[in-house]
Each structure stands twice: as structure tokens, then as C-alpha cells.
Amino acid sequence: MEVLWSLVVGVLVAAGIYLLLERHVLRVLFGLILLSSALNLAIFTAGRLTPGLLPLIGADATLPPDGAANPLPQALILTAIVIGFGLLIFALLLFYRAYYQTGSADVDDMKRSEEDE
Amino acid sequence: MDNITDSPETPNSQKHVSLLIFPLIPIVLLFSILSWYQPEGVSWQGHWIPGLDINLSFRLDGLSFLFAGLITGIGALIQFYALAYMRGDGGRFSFHLYLTLFMLSMLGLVTSDNILLLFVFWELTTITSYLLIGFNHEQNESRKKALQSLLVTGAGGLAFLAGLIFLGQMAGSYEVSVILQQTEQIADHPWFVTSLLLILLGVFTKSAQFPFHFWLPNAMAAPTPVSAYLHSATMVKAGVYLLARLSPVYSDSEVWFYALVIVGGFTAIWCALLAIKQTDLKLMLAYSTNVALGELVLLIGIGTEFALTAALLFILAHSFYKAALFMVVGNIDKATGTRDIRKLHGLRAVLVLSLVAAILAALSKSGVPPLLGFLSKEYMYKSGLEASGLITAVLMLANVFMVALAIAIIYKPFFANYQREPIVVKQVESSKGLWLPAMLLAVGSVAAPVLGLGWLNSQIIIPGVISSLPAATPDASKFWHGINLPLLLSVLTLLLGGAVYALYPRWLAKQKKAILPNAEAVFDLIMNGLMRLATWQTRCLQQKRLSNYVLMFSVVLAVILLSQPLMIAPERLMELFQLNFYEIAIALLLISAALVCTLSHSRLLAVASLSMVGFMTTLVFMLYSAADVAKTLLLVETLMVVFVVLLMRHMPRLTTVVRHSKKRRLLHAVIAGGVGLSVSALLINITAQPLDPTLAQFFANNSLPEGHGRNIVNVILVDFRAIDTLGEMIVVVIAGIAAISLLSSQNYKRAPVHSLIFTTTAQIVSTLMLVFSVYLLMRGHNEPGGGFIGALIAVIGLALLMFAKSPKYVRDRLHYSPMGIAMFGICLSFIAGLLSMAFHLPFLTGLWWKDVLPLGTPLLFDVGIYFAIIGGVMGILLRVNEVLD
Amino acid sequence: MTTIWLTLPVVLSLLTAVAVFTCQRRKWLCDLISATSVCATLVVAALLTYEVILNGPQAVAFGQWQAPFGIVFVADFLTVAMVLITAIIGAISVFYAMADIRTKHSYTAYHALMHVLLAGVYGAFLTGDIFNLYVWFEVMLIASFGLMILDANKTQIDGALKYVVLNLISTLFFLLAIGLLYGATGTLNLADLNTKAALIAPESQVLLSGLFLFAFAIKAALFPLFAWLPASYHTLPNVVVALFAALLTKVGVYALMRVFTLVFPLHESGWQSTLMWVAALTMLTGVLGAASQFDIKKILSFHIISQIGYMIMGLAVYTPLAIAGAIFYVVHHILVKANLFLIGGLIERRYGTSHLKQLGGAYKAMPWLAFLFFISAFSLAGFPPLSGFWGKFIVIKASLQTSDYWLAATALLVGLLTIFSMSKIWNEAFWKKPTNDELESKALSRATLYLYSLPIVMLAALSLLIGLVAEPFYQFAEHAAQQLLVPDAYIQAVLGGAP
């Protein structure tokens, strides 16, 4: 299973990087979003995959069932998702603002800070 | 040109008395040194940075004593002179201060017994010299020249540092006394020559040897007292001092001999030729200082008893006459406003006292008996003859030019009588400070050899020679050696000097045609080249375009990831054939969605496929038992799409922006593919081994008994790794605050009104969602759910309401500002964490009241998250809607 | 008590941020809270330092979940040095902000975000868990985003765009590296990783450490990954850029030092020689970049990069002496670089520009400021006996000891170029004649001037102190380097057990 999802992660990462290299500001954003989905999947895969056994402790048990999924990567991904969400929303609004001020959605036009006055 | 206006008795004169402290310091120091000094040497030890073997070790021996005496003695005279010379200058206080700081640094340099301590003082003299050369800093020329000298001596200083580190490394210590005991060991070390060359680089820059000689004449931009003190009597001799000091370590090597003799000799001749061409009195003196330094380097290179005696005598003689001459030139400048010998004439009537001093000094410079200069020249020739005819010839040639120069300096300004425009001369000799110091030095040039030769020999010359040549048993220097070859050479030098002076004008005319390569031009060329290189490389690295930066970063990433070929065992790939149908289907859907997103030209299609990626990922999490993650991701993806779509409508289509060229995109694809591939390979390789289950086991075992929760993921979030969650909460809230401020400047518009049915439905649904969110929050500790998921459900519910009604409606319903709610949430979580600290437990330790009610601080923590997320996300959502709709 | 000292820097900063944020309209209250908090943190940091010097590395396990299961905060010598210096810079920034940006409408937001940033920095220095390190990186990052766009003028937005995108790349790959590292070792605790990371297959180890290198190299602004820094820093208000210049890149350097001693010891990681080249090129390109600029803030920004090179050089040489030099350099650099930006800020406030062509005459107008600038500038250029010299001297000596002559030669050459570009500021802004008389008009009130100069004088005094009384600081750096290279005490403090 891990092999399959490793390959998928590779494709997502490649797609994300390709988009990051584009000039339209929205494409750059899509690249970031894709990359961050890819990473969630990567952490998940790295923590090994277990189909069908939630890391929950049953009502009358004190331990989760044998072979239950590894809870730690899940917790990490949850944290990463939420952090990623905050950062991406910020990036989105920043991109919008940059576009709004430049009048162009081309990231290569957004270089006022490096022009010599 | 010195920009000194001679306004008589400005308000500054009130400070005059307090300024007397400045000449007083060197006088006190001089007497202290005289009283401390013993010919066999005195040492003083103190701690500074023992860990780096840098100690405050000082030692006063014959060599140091000569320099220390010159530094303080001439220093006192210069301070007196400067009191008169700088009168009326607004910055005279700082001038004296810099001068004093310089003097102290120089004194430290010549008395240090630790080479790194010496280096510290060495660099301090560089800094103070920089400040003094640039003293008239409002003139471009001064600033430029100051910078030049700083860079040249600074560059040398850095090489010098490396050389000293090598030397210290070879000797195992930075203490001079230790180094001097290890000479044999050092001589056999492979670093020997390297360290020698590096140290010489430092010395040659400091003592203005060819090809670094040019900074010294340029340093004449400084006020004259500085030229007299730093750039003739003291600082430039620091290099010579160092050569003499390290001579016992290096003098046996041939590199040392040839380097010093060739460089010193060449500098002497070269600068003598340049000196004779000059028309500015100060420049003439400056180049003649170069000559003297070259001769000194040469003498130390010869390194015999005679040569060292000559060097020490010459240092003394040169300091006396050169400082005196500079002061006289300063007086001429002050009196007439010019230093150009083509304009000056007939000053003998006005500057009588200066003239007397100048004549004495010039005689010493020319080497006329019985002055100091004569004595040094005798020994110079003696040592030259001992070494080789060529060296003697070099020394003599340089001296001939010096004689000619001395005649020119005296004759032209004072005696020449041109029939040109008369020059206005001010009476400056009423001020004792201007002529007395020069006169004292000039008289000293006579008195020292006549009256004090015995003292000089026993206190300075003999111990000084021994400092540099420990094995030597030097004889006392004498005046009269009978009629011998050196004496004849001295006489010949004088005669030839006169002849050169006579032929001088014709010679000068010819010189104009001859072009000497100019070291300064080379320096300027290097500096310009450097600037061009700097601009060019900065343009290459900072291309201002984001896509180029990202490209650079990706290339680096690809290079790093492809640096190591990874082998994937083929049997691992066999796994792919044992997969379920739906796994493959989801994977293919994910891949194709990603590809569509990458290639699509339509915004909407791209966003649709992006959300496809998101939802497919959710399915993957669902599939492999990550219920909490799947739920959260679903909600986050939904919100994300809402945001993207909201903003995307206000942004131009994808096709409006020019894309990169086909070739460039191919390159992008290759890089992206490379990175993707190696990430896959790495992941496959890493998952080939079984995972160390220790942590997972611990969480499984302790979740219920210690964490009081059945949903292990949630227990990890709010208890085991609660501090991660705390940080993440902060990130979301701050992201909200930051994002809001991005949208703060625009006006709010009224939201569109929607249909009544939609509004009513929305109200009901959102209420239900809020209730559901609270339920999820409550059960989160035991079953999938928790603060995040609950909060996100609530946010979506509120968003629905916002779309149905208006952002303002939601704001009113919330009652508190979203960010206020967020802060409240953060505070709750903090309280949950801090409560345990009141019981002397670590931060965020869970406290439970299981006996009474199933409540504990981790639950409170989760409630905090709930509020923080609602507040943070709603804050942005409301603002985005207010601004954009 | 140590557990409290370990916890408080982060908690106090975050609580202050919340408090300041809540008292939005009342600037005086914000000032009061902010100032009290930074002073208190300074005391806490000092107590923590004292404790660690006395008793060796200290750790606290949050929620009483022992490492490697829970998250620990650990403080060894390097950590306390960084925490203490951060506390100093934090205090300085808060006071300087009162003089510099009090008139801005977003003044309280600046304070709140500054405290969040500080919390992130403290967290990053203190944490003993790699994923937690990621979280603090993000806290720091989002706060820096916020600070960057608070004024939201056009150049700032464009600068921020590059800053955000390029830093997000770093963050994302850092996260990937953590995920993979966890997958390979099953643990996240740095001390635990010390033994477990060595068991990873060698090829994977190289690539994994390469990913960390990539992520941290962006944070630390190493060649060729520094583009975000000169693109954005100069657009910021001076107090913010001083704070950034002092701390942000140094967190990257700290992370490199920590990870490449504790988790992937550099000499076994396969990246040592690469890192040496990177260090040399970082020094060189940074200083050349500075030489090509004519704006105080831009020059100083490029200099940050160049000096990061010196620190990385110390790490790359990887001997106790070299790392001690790097640590010494970090501390020196934080003080001096922050101060130069603060001085630049005062000049900009006074003359309304930071462009060298328009400036002039500051030497006459503000001789005391000239003196302070001179000390800081020459300290930066590495002139003895100022603090910069010792750092430079130690790393150069270390590289000569290991026979990396070219590296030492580069460092020396860069020293010369640093002199060149620092004297450019001195020549143009201080020594040159004022270009026009209007420049003189913006005299500041005495009170404002005092508020401006207090932080500047304090930082200058500190860097002078480090230069003149270098021995204790050197001893401290040497101990810190020893602890990094032989992390037994650190590991014992975290995991317990026999030493």
C-alpha cells in the first residue's frame, strides 16, 4: 500500500512544484495548496497505513484493538492541516492584495520592493 | 589641502587650557617609560583572554624603548604643535582625542609581547589613522584617501592576522618570548614560508612598500600634524618595528632576505624617482618617507649587526628630521595658503625660525656631519659594503635623490626669487607652538649625536640590536671611523645630490613624457572591477522575479534530492499488484486531478480539480483509519474552496498572464519530476522497514488510564502533545489577524439580499450545525470529533448564515468581535495549561476530577481550541465578505 | 523552579500578546504591559541561564509525559545563550518601538505580533522535539508575515509576497522531512533521534538530512537560497527589521546547529564539504551584494547574509573551536546587527530617507550617534578589540587548524569587503557634507531622542563589553560547543538514565 501512495505523493509534489514555478499568482497558490496536500499524505504514508482499524478504545476495553492504526501521524497531520490552512488563507489574501495593487496577476511584475528608486 | 582658516582667537581659545591635557599625557608617559626602562628589558603580564592565549603581556626592551620614546616624545611635540595649528578648527577636540588614541595604540603596538595583542593595537592604529586622514571629512578627496588607506592597510592587516595565526600555531603560543625560543622548530614547519609571506604582506602595506606605497602620499589629505606624526615618525614604521621584532624567527631564511632586500630596495629607488617629480612640498616629503621606509626594510633584510645599527640610527634620525620638516611645511602652508614650490619663493624673511629648523633638518636628511643623519648613513654604507656592491649602489642612489630633494625643499620656498606674482604671507611665527616643536627636533638632530651618543649606544642601539639579533655582540657606534670607503661614499652622495639638483629642472621636463605605471591606478582599477563584479553578481542572484527565485530554490532542492541514487527493491513494487480496486481508483483519480489542475487553463476547472485532490485525500484518510483527519480535512478543504472561489472571482483569468517559454516549462517539468520522483523513492525506501512502535504503543497504553480518553488522536492533541496544539491555535488566530489587516483599507459594501427561502433554511441549518458542533466538541475526547472539528462545523454553519443574510448579521449574532472570541479561546487553553503549574506540575499537565464529574483541564483546553478557531476563521471570513461582496 | 523558567519565556510572551491585543486603543496600557513583560522575560532568561550554568542542561516534560513520548523543553548552554540574547533583543525592540512607531495606527498590533514572534523564537530555541520545532517555526513565521504587512504599502506587499512564498517552500519541505524522519525512526524527540537516526539506511540518511539542510538553509538565508531576505527586509519599519535581522535567520542557524550535531552529526552526514562551500559563497555573495547597494537598510540586509556565512563556516568546520566561534559570532552578530538597524532607523527618522545619496552630515549633527555607529560598524567589520573580531578570529583560526585554507582566505577577504561597504555608510551618511539644507529640518524632541538612544546605547555597550571582556563569553561558547559535539548531558537531561 505504501508504495502506491508514495508514488501518488511523488506526483502531487511534482505537480505542486511545477505550479509554483508558474507566473500567474493563482497558479502559485494552487501549487502551495497541492504541495501541502501532498505532504499530509506523505506524513500519513510514512507513519504506515492500516486499513479499517481506528485508533479508538472501545467502550469496555482499556486498549485499542490489536493492530489499530498509528495515532501519532494522525495527530501530526491534524496539526499540520490546521497550520497549513492558516498560512494558505493568509497567502491567498496576500496574493489578492498584491494583485490588487499591481494590477497584474503576474508574480514577475510584483517586484516593486527590489526596484531602485 | 588643509582647510584651516586662521581666524584669530575664536571662542575655542577658552578651551585652550583644558586642551593642554593632550600634550601632557605623552609627556607623563615619556617620563614613566624612561623611569621603567632597563636595557635588559622589563616585562609586565596580565590576563585578558587566556582561553585563546591572548594575554596582556607587555615588554619594554631596547627596540621597544626606541619606538616608545619616539612615540611619546614626538607625540608631545606634535600635540603642542597641533594646539597651535588647529586653533580655530571646530573639531579640534576630537582631533586631539583621535591623536591621543592613536598614540596609545601605537605605544601598545611597540610594547606588546603577545602577537595577537600586537595585532589588536596594529588594527587600532589603522582605525585611528583612518579617522585622522579623513579629518577634513567634508571634502570628497579626504574621504576617498582615508578609505584608500583603510582598505590597503586593512587588507594587509587581514593577511597579517592569518600569518600570525600560523606563527602562533607553529610555536604553540602567541607569546613573543615563547615564539623566540622555538625558532628552530618553526623553521622546519611546512607553514614557515606561508606565515612569513603573509606577515610580510601586512608589513609592506603598513610601511607603504611597493606596490602598496601609494596610500602614504595620498594620506597627506590629513592635517599636517597627522602627516608629521603618523605618516612619517610613527605608524608607518610599525611594519619596520615588526620586522625587527620577528627578525630572530625568520632572518635565517632566504625568502626573508630576498623579499626584504628586493622590495625595500625597489621601493626606495622607485619612490625617490617619484619624489623628485613632485611640486607639492608635502608630497615630496611623503615620497621621501617611502624612500626611508624602503631603506629600513632593506637594512633589516640584510640583518647584520651593522645593518641593524644603521636601521636603528636611521629610525631615530628620520623621525627627528622628517617630523621637523613636516611642521615647517605646515607653517609655510599656514602662512601662504599653498605648498606648491612653483609658487612659493622668498619666505626666508618671514619664516626665519622655521627656516633655521628646516635647514638643520635638511642637513640631517642629507647626511652632513655631525648630524644624526650622517651617523646613520655611515652605518648604512658600512652594512651595504659588507653585503654587496649592488645593495650599496641602491642605497647610494636613493640617498643622492634625498640630498637633491633636501636642497629643493630648502632652496625653493625660502631662497628662490621668481619675478612672478607676489604671494601674501601671514605672520604665523608669533605663535610659539608652530615653530618651537620643529626647532626642538632639529636641534635634537644635532645634539643627540654630539652630546648623547654614549647614552644612545648603551640604552638603545646595543640592546636594540640584540633584540633583533640575539646572538650579536654589537660595538658601540662611533662618529669617526677614520677616512674609509663609507665616508667617501657619504661625500660622494652629497656631491652627486647637488649635481642632481642642478640638473633637476631639465630632468623634470623629460620626466613628463616618461610614463611610470601607476600603482594607484591599479588599485582604482581593482576597486572598480570589484564594484562591477558586485553589481553583476547581485543582478544575477537577485533577479527581482519571484518565478526565478522559485526556480533557483527548486533546482537546489532537486540537486540535493538527486545527489544520492536510491535503489528500490523490485519486490516492493510487486505490492502494487495486490491492491484493491478502489485503492487504485482513488490513486488514479488523485493523480489525474493533480494533472488537470496543473495543465488547466480555466480557473474554475483548476479549482475544481484542486478540491477533487482534497476530497480524494480525505477518502484516503478515511480508508486507512484516520477518521479525525478525514473529517477535519473535509471541512478545511471546503472552507478553503470557499475562500479561493470568493477571491478568485476578483482575479484575472489564468490566460491573461504570459506563460514561460516552452523550453523553460520543460525545464520546470524536469525539475519537478525529479523532485517528485526522489520524494517517492525516499518514501518507499523508508517504509520498507517496519516502524519503531514504541511511541504508538505508549499512546495506546496510556490514553485511557492516564489521559482519560478513548480517542487516542484527540488525547495526543489535547494532552500528550498539547503544546503543539497550542502553537497551532496561535498560528490560525494570528493568520486571521494578519489577513484582516491586509484587507483593512477598503470600503465595506452592502451584501446582496438572497431569497427568503434560502435565508430561512440557512438559519435552521446553521443553528443545527452549531448544536452539532458543540456535540462534536463534547464527545471529542472519546470518539472522533473534538475542538477543531467542532469549530470548523460551527464556522461552516455561520458561513452559511453569512451568505444567507449578511456579514453584519453574523457579526451582530456573534455579539463579540471574532478576534475577541479567539483571544478568549486562547486564554481558556492557557488557563487549562497554567492551572497545573499552580500545583507545581509542569505546564499543561492534565488535572482530572473523575470522582465527581468526567471533567479535566484537557477538556477545557479543547474548548479553548474550539473558540479560538471559530474566532480566527470567522474573523477572516467575515472580513473577506465585507470587502469583496 | 527550573521547569517554570523553561516554560515562562514562551507562555509569558503569548499571554502578553493576548493582553496587548485586547487593550487595542489604549497605547499607554499596551506600553506598560509590553515593557513589563519583556523585562520579566529578561529576568526569567537570566535565571534560566544561571541555573543551566550551575547545574548543566535542564529539561521539562510538558504534561508530565516523559520524553520521548511527550514534548520537552530543554536548555543547554547554546539554548540559554540564544534565549537570553532574544530576551535582550525583545526588550530593546519594545522600547525602541515606543520611540519609532508609536504614531502608527497599528501600534498595538505591532506589539502583539512582536510578542508572538518572540514566543515563536523562544519556543524554537527551547524545544526538544522536532515536530514542535516546526510548530514554533510556524508561529514565528506567521507573526513575521503579520509584521511585514501591517503598514501594507505597495513595496511592502511585493516584498512580502516573495518572503511568504519562499518561506512557505522552506516550511513545507521541513514538514516533509519531519514526516519522513518519523517514518524512518518512529520518534520525534531530538535526543531520542540522536541514536535512532544513525540506524537509518545511509542513502536515505543523506537525503533526509539534505531535506533538513534545504529547509533550514532557506530560513538561515544561505547561498543560493537567500533571495527572500534582500527582497523584503528593507521595506519594513526599522524596529521590525532590527528584530528580524537579529532573530529570524539565527533561528535557522540554530536549527542547523542543533540538527547537524544532535540528529545527523555533520561529519557523518555527507554534507560537510558542501556546507563549507555554501558558507564561503554565502559570505562572499552577501558582502558583494552589500557593496553594490546605496541604501543603508539594503546594505545592512545583505550584510546579514554575509555574516550568516561566518556562522555556517564555524559549523561546517565542525571542531569544538570552530563551533565555539560560530556561537560567539551569533551572539555578537545579533547585538551588533540589531543596533546598526536601530541607528539606521534613527537616521531615517531624522532625515526622512535611508538612501546614501541623499544623506550627509550626520557626524556633525549627531556626533554621539556617529560614535555609536562607528563602534558597531567596525565591530561588524571585525576590527579588534570589538566583539566581531573575536568571532571572526576564532572561526578563521579553526579553519586554519583543519587546513581549510581557502575557507579562511575567503573569510579574510570578506572581512575586507565588509570594511569597504560599512565605511561607505560612514562616508556618505556621516562624513559627507549634507546634500541640502532641508535635511536638517526634522529635529526630534528631546524625549523621543532619549527613547531612541537608550536601546542603541545599551546594545553598543553590550557589544563593547563582549569585545573587551571576551574571556567569559568565549569560555561559555566553548562549553556550549562541547555540549553540542558531545551531547551526552543534553540527552541525559531529556531522556534520563545513566550519563
Image (cartoon, grey):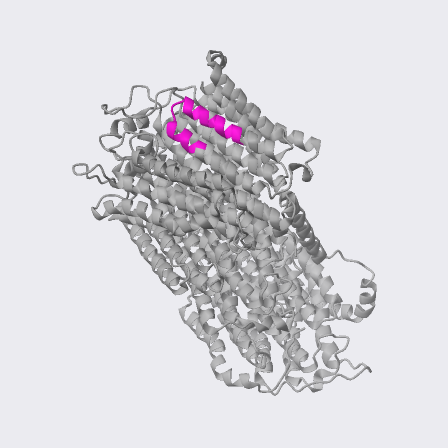
Decide whether residue B65 is among the magenta residues.
Answer: no
**Residue at the spot 45% in from the left edge and 62% down from the top edge:** C96
* Quadrant in which the N terminus of chain B appears: bottom right
| Residue C406 in the image: above or below residue B691 | below
- Residue B322 in view: no
Question: In this orientation, which residue lies closer to the viewer: B341 or B590?
Answer: B590
**Quadrant in the picture for residue C134:** top left
Q: Position of residue B806 (x, y in %)?
A: 48, 47
Question: In this orientation, which residue lies closer to the viewer: C237 or A76?
Answer: A76
Q: Position of residue B677 (x, y in %)?
A: 55, 24
Q: Position of residue B686 (x, y in %)?
A: 44, 23
**What secondary structure predominates along the stretch shown in magenta?**
helix
Magenta stretch? B611-634
**Residue at the spot 27% in from the left edge and 32% down from the top edge:** B709
Q: Left or right of B255: which side holds C207? A: left
Question: In this orientation, which residue lies closer to the viewer: C150 or B790?
Answer: B790
Question: In this orientation, which residue lies closer to the viewer: C463 or B774?
Answer: B774
Q: Position of residue C424 (x, y in %)?
A: 60, 60
Decide whether residue B619 is among the magenta residues.
Answer: yes
- Residue C376 in view: yes
